[in-house]
Amino acid sequence: MTFDNDYVESVWFLLSRYAANDLLYQGSKVLPWCGRCGTGLSSHEVSQGYRDIDDPSVYITFPLIDASGDLQNAELVAWTTTPWTLPSNMAVCVHPDFEYAIIESDARRFVMLESKAAAVFGEDNYTVVGSVQGEALKGLSYTPLFSYDGGIVIHEGSNRHIVVADSFVSDDDGTGMVHMAPYGADDFRIAQSNDILAMLAVGEDARFVSDVSTVSAGTLFRDANKELSRDLKERGRMLKVSQCNHSYPHCWRCATPLIYFPAPAWFLRTTAYKDKMIEQNKQTKWAPPEIGEGRFGEWLENNIDWALSRDRFWGTPLPVWINEDDEDDWICVESFAQLGELCGGLPDNFDPHRPMVDDITFETPTAGKSGTMRRVTQVIDCWFDSGAMPLAQHHWPFENRELVAEQFPADFICEGLDQTRGWFYSLHSISTFLTQHDEKLWQSGELWGAELPRLERGSAFKSCLVNGLMLDKSGQKMSKSKGNIVVPGDAIAEHGADAIRWSLLSGGAAHLSRRYDNQAVSDVRRRVLGTLGASYDFFALYAKSEGFDTSAAFPELASRPAIDRWVLSQVSAAAAKASEAFSEMQPSNALRAIEDFIVDDLSNWYIRRSRRRFWGDEGEASQRAAFATLYQALHAVLRMIAPVTPFFADAIWGELVGGGSVHLQMYPDSNNDTDVAIASAYDADLSAAMNPIMRASSLGRSVRERVQIRVRQPLSSMVVHIAKESELAMSPREYSDALRQELNVKEVTWIDGTPDFLKVSAKANFKTLGRKAGKNMKALATLIGDMPREQIFALQGGEELTVEAGGESYTLVNEDIILQTESAEGLEAATDGYVTIGLNTEISGELRAEGIAREITNRLQTQRKEVGLEMSDRIEVRLTGCAAVQSVLDVHAAAIAEEVLAPSGIFFSADSLDIADNAYRKWDLPDDLSIEVIIGKIDVTTAS
RNA sequence: GGGCCAGUAGCUCAGUUGGUUAGAGCGUCCGCCUGAUAAGCGGGAGGUCAGAGGUUCAAAUCCUCUUUGGCCCA
């Protein structure tokens, strides 16, 4: 897109605005430089490419010439990790205020900071014989490391190889003395201020320009480190050589180590509006906030001018034309039209890129001057292109002025953590300049004679979600050059884009780095998308076979069973939660809420509990309510997941509603949804009341597991006690049926109060008591834990109770204790402290028979499946078994026959069946019973 | 070297303003269901919350240090 001519023109316009405000200038600056690409890099580009590398860590000496007194024959000691810069050495810099030690070691005399001496000479291998202040060393000459004059002179000067003093010298690293070469910003500045001859041994291609020592011309800079070190060591000028591993900037494009190199460059004076950027950034909502306040804010505080130009061929050409005869006479062109006017007409197939644009020249338009204007050779930093995106993508201000004014700024952007100094900065910097600094542009409200709608003051984005980096399996950053990337196409082919998207968004806080986990994607696909898909399939299957019409009016919400209102309340609550989490830029929380609804509420509870209603077992009204409810729940869920799983959601949506796109729908809103049922569905009381039922169900399964009575075996009764049930606005008792069916018990008895057979205990409420009790809290908690039943109930009844703990007395009230139920005597019980259930596990003969009947049903259903019958096929059954089986059938044959769709009933015979029959099967039942069965499909018409 | 983030079950991650059984999914073990079926469900087991100090009646949570990893910068 940035290649597009319109885009280029917009970028040109923006640059011309910088120029119009005197914020575009040419300078010469020591730049991080890539010798291979032959270009300088901006600071935010440098920040893309730090890598750890091994460099030599060496101490070199500079013997003073003509020094007297203690300093006679003394050698200055400096430290460097870049031996390749040593031939370019021009000076040694000391700090004027530091106290340097004069040291003797091995019969030689050295000058350096005493605190660093042990690192150079070893703990006891030196003696301090005197000291000298940095200021006193200033101006002394020393013997150069190499006799070398073959370099490129970049700064003329009358001094060379002298000691200079400057306060930039630190005592953190090295020796407190710094070897100076023109490859650093400070070094270059000091050369200028001290009239020092600066000569580069390494040129702009990062190679030596002529032979030095044993290094020949053309050697790449770091490749010379070894030879130079060996030479210096042999000549006694190098004291110690070791390796150090440190972080060093590399070219983000080609991974070549950078050098610092003085080069001509064009700059944007961003420091002129730095305060506005800092101020503006405080209005931006960052997730997580510390990125905005800390990392990005810090970066803005330390803002330096943007080195804009690049010495490359490809890119948006810098629209600056300079007078060949007067380098101060230059113009930044704002549009193709302007360029056409200047040069007397653009060619028909004008292309603003190189090389065509380089051929365009014209006579200087500056009054009183003459000469040919020629374009500078540079192109611009592509990060400027990226930051111009909100405007340049619409060819603003040449076109779409209203559109851009309406859209700008973006509500939200999202990019990786590594973009702090890349895209986030370029967007922020350009728009802050344009909307808050460039007053000239907006003053008249017009541009080129036509209205220019004001862009909202501020940054280009109102909120920004910073996402962590995707790491590979072993936690390493993925990169093309390392070859450890997950190829998106492959991953998508395997799982689908939607599953991957869901997995990444839900798999943890967005700003944390994450390993790409293939397994997690499969899980999501199966557990979430699969479950929702199956839920829809269930709906579709029965909506079709039962003839449910989605276009007919749905039953009133109030008239539907509690569980219907419950599930709609749940979907409404999930929508509210998701909506809030998305606005807070916490997508994983949003998706968790949706997942919980889909898997737990919708599929595992609502549909499972309501299955029979869908095939009409509980009457037509109930059936219609169930279909309507499931339809509305799916309708809402699809709208909820659409932004995350656009393809999946839209595909199901098309089937569910028979066309259209889910992406044209509003996100479910629990207050004002397009679906009235959803808008009015949320009911906190209703939702809360189901919770104890689900807990009771779980406890009941736990008990059945413990006593080894399978769910298929009906039990007569269970009791349920809910602590503080009276405080619930809606009674869970409305959901008795769900619990009864789930646990297969005939009767649920709800317990009021706390009858004697429930064992109870009290737990201290640390929140209310903690502050009061102080260090006696432990004693008090123990005491409350042992509290007898009568006292607990006294407190519950509103009485106060005074107790002694740790020598102090405390007055307890009801809220200071938490009532817990421990178990129920005489029943198989279980409790989670809040809900307590007891199962009557006595199995009467009738229950036993019913259990066996269900076992038989189970076997027949399995057998149906084994012989490949369709769900709706009718069968006839011939069955044989012992007397016990027969007595079960005496009572339950009709019910079994109905369940297995055997309209003519079950034919029981005591005689053996024909084992050779294909449909013959022998089954074992519990209690050492067994049956033999032959089933056969029958024609419905003849059977009826 | 500095700044920021993170370290919680075998794995991937949640965990509200500090409050007493530290949760989920996957895996594992045991079991269930069979009219969603190349599906589904339940119940167990599993944690010294990286380590060490500190603050507090009380710390996964707050503070300090150490350590490991990630990102950014010098």
Image (cartoon, grey):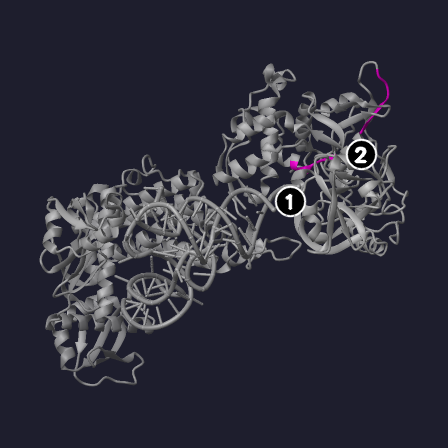
Element under label 1?
A: loop
Q: Earlier in the sequence, mark 1 or mark 2?
A: 1
Residue occupying the point 59% across, 19% down: A452
Q: Amino acid at mark 1?
A: Gln
Inspect this view and state whether residue A49 appears.
yes
Pointer 1 and pointer 2: residues touching (CB < 8 Å)? no
Residue A833 falls left or right of residue A869: left
Disc tally is 2
Residue occupying the point 49% across, 30% down: A283
Provide residue A933's location: percent of width, then percent of height: 24, 78
Q: Which residue matches tag 2?
A: A191
Residue occupying the point 66% across, 34% down: A384
Specify few, some or many for label 1: CA neighbours under 10 Å numbering under 14, 14-19, or 20 or more. Answer: some
Q: Is residue A801 above or below residue A272?
A: below
Q: Residue A789: which quarter of the image? A: bottom left
Q: Which chain is indicated by disc 2?
A: A
Inspect this view and state whether residue A252 appears.
no
* B47 vs B12, nearest the viewer: B47
In the rendered image, residue A379 lying in the magenta stretch gets the answer: yes
Q: Give the mark toward the camera: 1 or 2.
A: 2
| Res A724 label | none
Q: In the image, which residues are magenta?
A: A369-383
Q: Which residue matches tag 1?
A: A48
Provide residue B64's location: percent of width, then percent of height: 48, 46
* A858 vs A619, nearest the viewer: A858
